[in-house]
Image (cartoon, rainbow, N blue to C red):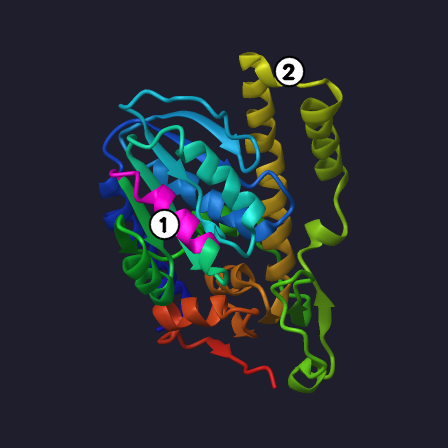
């Protein structure tokens, strides 16, 4: 099947399985208040999915702004999905663990995540903490992560695809642009990139190379929001962070301005190309949602191939390239 048909299939699976787990009002924590478009696409899909739930969102927070307070037991804690469960992006995962340790008996759902540990001592520490949470469900977004969680954690575990697949197709169409370029190599610039001098031998001769535009060339809107956020969190000595009205405005700024800016740029950027080569998982996912011919190179620990093998291997227009 083609990638758009596959996307609809995965979206339906998320609606059936994940919405069943949400049976009371909730908080939505760990939102991507930063310039990675891929994580913003997860956020977009999360919002779209939650519009189908009869329950209400009572509060939100960014990935480094967890409130660190006891919550009423009748609230479910939803932790935004992504690729930070473990010790690859440990700083972000520590924020999650610190918050959950205060609310061990609440119903908690860690939404679809890639799970990766390469330090047994860190894993042992997390096993102990999560074992104290009797109402925790871990959603793994690929089969390897699922098997790992099932083996190492004594919590409920389920296998679900990335929430970016729940993005509204009309929303994608709104920002989609006509094709004006032939090939894009979306090349990440962080520690997940496999270091290789052979990329140029596996790519077409004429190809544009770039990471997400928001990470390379921030727009005026993006820079303005980031300046306001920095002042809010650092220059005002924490006074505003204790003010409920100011905190609500801070979150609304990210929801209504920053999120839309990130998503718009990503969709416009990818849609202008006929063929996508990518080292980013959400480069592959967004290209799939837009029906592009797509080729991916795996990241440093197999995240993209694990996801592809779990959900997309029967998709006609998505292909893997092995880095030599």
Disc with the residue nearer the chain's start (2 vs 1): 1
Disc 1 residue crowd, few under 14, some 14–19, many 20+, Cα 10 Å? some
Disc 2 residue crowd, few under 14, some 14–19, many 20+, Cα 10 Å? some
Q: Is residue 50 left or right of residue 252?
A: left
Please tell me whether mark 2 or mark 1 is closer to you in this view.
Answer: 1
Q: Main secondary structure of the magenta part?
A: helix
Instruction: Name the quadrant of the N terminus.
Output: bottom left
Find disc 1 in the rendering and name its residue: 127
Residue farthest along the front direction in this orientation? 121
Circle 1 sits in a helix, a strand or a loop, which is it? Answer: helix
Nearer the observer, 68 or 276: 68
Q: Position of residue 229 (x, y in %)?
A: 68, 29
| Magenta stretch encompasses residue 140 | no
Report the Cα–Cα distance between label 2 and label 1: 36 Å
Nearer the observer, 164 or 69: 69
Q: Is residue 35 left or right of residue 111?
A: right
Decide: is 144 above or below 156.
Answer: below
Nearer the observer, 211 or 99: 99
Residue 9 seen: no
Range drawn in magenta: 122-135
Residue 271 seen: yes
Q: Residue at x 55, y 49 (%)?
A: 90
Find disc 2 in the rendering and name its residue: 240
Q: Is residue 17 left or right of residue 187?
A: left
Q: Residue at x 26, y 50 (%)?
A: 154
Residue 260: which quarter of the image? top right
């Amino acid at each position: 099947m083609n990638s758009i048909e596959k996307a609809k299939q995965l979206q339906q699976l998320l609606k059936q399985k994940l919405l069943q787990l949400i049976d009371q009002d909730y908080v939505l924590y760990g939102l991507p208040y930063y310039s990675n478009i891929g994580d913003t696409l997860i956020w977009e899909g999360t919002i779209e999915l939650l519009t189908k739930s009869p329950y209400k969102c009572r509060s939100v927070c960014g990935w480094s702004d967890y409130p660190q307070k006891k919550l009423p037991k009748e609230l479910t804690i939803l932790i935004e999905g992504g690729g930070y469960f473990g010790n690859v992006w440990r700083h972000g995962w520590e924020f999650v663990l610190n918050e959950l340790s205060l609310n061990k008996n609440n119903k908690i759902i860690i939404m679809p995540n890639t799970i990766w540990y390469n330090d047994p001592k860190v894993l042992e520490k997390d096993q102990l903490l999560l074992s104290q949470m009797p109402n925790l469900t871990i959603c793994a977004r690929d089969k390897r992560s699922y098997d790992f969680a099932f083996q190492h954690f004594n919590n409920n575990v389920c296998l679900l695809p990335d929430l970016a697949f729940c993005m509204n197709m009309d929303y994608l169409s709104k920002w989609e642009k006509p094709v004006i370029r032939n090939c894009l190599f979306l090349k990440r610039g962080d520690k997940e990139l496999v270091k290789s001098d052979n990329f140029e031998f596996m790519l077409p001769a004429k190809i544009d190379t770039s990471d997400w535009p928001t990470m390379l060339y921030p727009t005026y809107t993006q820079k303005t929001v980031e300046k306001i956020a920095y002042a809010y969190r650092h220059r005002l000595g924490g006074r505003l962070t204790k003010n409920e009205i100011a905190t609500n405005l801070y979150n609304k700024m990210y929801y209504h301005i920053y999120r839309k800016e990130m998503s718009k740029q990503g969709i416009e950027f990818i849609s202008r190309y006929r063929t996508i080569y990518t080292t980013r998982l959400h480069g592959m996912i967004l290209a799939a949602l837009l029906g592009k011919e797509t080729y991916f190179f795996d990241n440093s620990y197999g995240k993209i191939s694990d996801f592809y093998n779990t959900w997309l291997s029967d998709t006609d227009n998505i292909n893997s390239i092995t880095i030599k």
